[in-house]
Amino acid sequence: MKTWKKLLLGLTGVFALTALAACSSSNNTLDKVKDKGTLTVALNPHFAPFEFKTLQDGKDTVVGADVEIAKAIADELGVKVKFSEMSFDNVLASVQSGKADIAISGISATKERQKTFDFSDTYYESETVLVVKKDDAGAYKQTSNFAKKSVAVQKGSIQEKIAKSNLSDANVVALSQPGEAINELKSGQVNGVVLEKAIAQGYVEQNSDLAVS
């Protein structure tokens, strides 16, 4: 939908380089949003720094870069914004069913998804990397080192597809949230976690026993 695509503010923007964008499923989305006066945004708030929860004035609040972009779109349209929280694998389905007007949740604009959804212009280019235990980092220098190993991904994410394509000899375990995958790594249930680079760096900074492979 050309009109609303132009409303996104421009932002400056290791298996694959992917482009993050917001998306809609209908050419009539803009008119519907203006008529009801509210922009309903589907997201999964477990993807810092893009969308995550924090306490503000004692209240559990969704914040992040994607959240600010969604607010800017709503301001430009002159409508209120409503965030609809859900698991990541339901984000796009929510837009397709009409339960949400747009989705903005660290979504990669793939050719397959573009067959169904209208995407905004790219606002961020991301790399996909592997997070491992710091003590094991020396053992993982190339993708072949993960043969017969287990790696975790977020279910429904582009990283799930990337892992299955690039780590075909590994056991790919799909979990609901990135944090769950990191916990599986720390407890030794999996050998690595495939994540978007910015999210991976955030976990590594908070966990001295982890490293980007």
Image: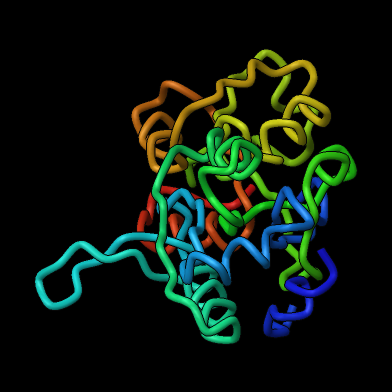
93 horizontally vs 209: left or right:
right
- Residue at image point 63% right, 53% down: 196
Of 141 and 46, the residue lying toward us: 46
Above or below residue 199? Residue 96 is above
Residue 150 lies, in percent from the top left, at 58, 20
148 horizontally vs 101: left or right:
right
Residue 136 lies, in percent from the top left, at 54, 38
- Residue at image point 48% right, 27% down: 175
Of 53 and 116, the residue lying toward us: 116
Residue 30 lies, in percent from the top left, at 68, 67
Colour pattern? rainbow
Of 141 and 159, the residue lying toward us: 159
Of 28 and 12, the residue lying toward us: 28
- Residue at image point 56% right, 45% down: 131
- Residue at image point 64% right, 15% down: 171
Query: Total marks drawn?
Result: 0
Residue 101 lies, in percent from the top left, at 58, 55
